[in-house]
């Protein structure tokens, strides 16, 4: 049977195991995103779809209003953010509260195919849809190939 921990001849743990564990802990801490409850930063989930003439980003962010979102483009970076702290929800008689809208920021690096002047967004039913049109000449061209 394979034993993950390495031991020296005298039965003590091998120093390499200690360093490996310390390194894992350090890297987990370095790349952890802390902010808010339970030590995690809140990021809504995002799906990106490429169509022939555009990209569409779907940001799943229920509990906000259209005016809560701030979307800006700086060079080739698209930033979607909500900086509003949610109104006090303690007025409600919650039996259990598992969801609370929070502030967040997501950034996306855009490629050279994007027409940066025609970015549009629409918020409906808890989903922010950001449409990024492709520049002329970068549209996907499709054709069928005959089989001989």
Image: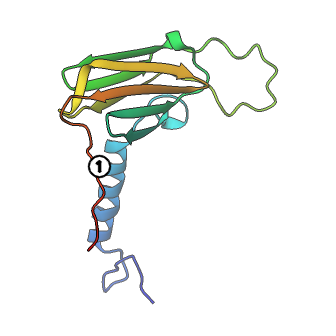
- Looking at the rendered structure, the secondary structure element under dot 1 is loop
48 w.r.t. 102: above or below: below
Q: How many marks?
A: 1
The N terminus sits in image quarter:
bottom left
Q: How was the colour assigned to the protein in this rendering?
A: rainbow
Question: Of residues 11 and 71, which is closer to you in this image?
Answer: 71
Horizontal and vertical percent position of residue 51: 36, 40
| Left or right for 81, reference 140 | right
Horizontal and vertical percent position of residue 90: 72, 16
Question: Of residues 69 and 86, which is closer to you in this image?
Answer: 69
Q: Residue at x 34, y 80 (%)?
A: 7
Q: Residue at x 32, y 16 (%)?
A: 72
Question: Of residues 90 and 130, which is closer to you in this image?
Answer: 130
22 w.r.t. 56: above or below: below
The C terminus sits in image quarter:
bottom left
Q: Residue at x 30, y 24 (%)?
A: 78
| Left or right for 99, reference 53 | right
Q: Residue at x 42, y 86 (%)?
A: 2
Label 1: which residue? 142
Camera sees residue 11: yes
- Within the image, what quadrant is residue 9 found in? bottom left
Camera sees residue 42: no
Horizontal and vertical percent position of residue 15: 27, 70
| Left or right for 91, reference 1 | right
Q: Residue furthest bottom?
A: 1
Local crowd size for mark 1, using a 10 Å CA cut-off: few (<14), some (14–19), many (≥20): few
Question: Of residues 52 and 35, which is closer to you in this image?
Answer: 52
- Within the image, what quadrant is residue 135 found in? top left
């Amino acid at each position: 049977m394979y034993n993950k921990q390495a031991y020296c001849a005298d039965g003590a743990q091998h120093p390499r195991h200690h360093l490996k564990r310390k390194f894992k802990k350090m890297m987990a801490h370095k790349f952890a995103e802390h902010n808010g409850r339970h030590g995690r930063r809140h990021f809504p989930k995002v799906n990106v779809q490429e169509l022939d003439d555009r990209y569409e980003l779907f940001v799943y962010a229920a509990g906000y209003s259209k005016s809560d979102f701030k979307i800006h483009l700086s060079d080739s970076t698209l930033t979607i953010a909500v900086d509003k702290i949610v109104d006090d929800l303690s007025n409600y008689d919650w039996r259990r509260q598992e969801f609370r809208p929070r502030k967040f920021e997501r950034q996306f690096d855009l490629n050279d195919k994007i027409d940066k002047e025609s970015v549009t967004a629409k918020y409906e039913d808890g989903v922010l849809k950001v449409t990024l049109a492709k520049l002329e000449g970068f549209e996907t061209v499709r054709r069928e190939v005959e089989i001989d």
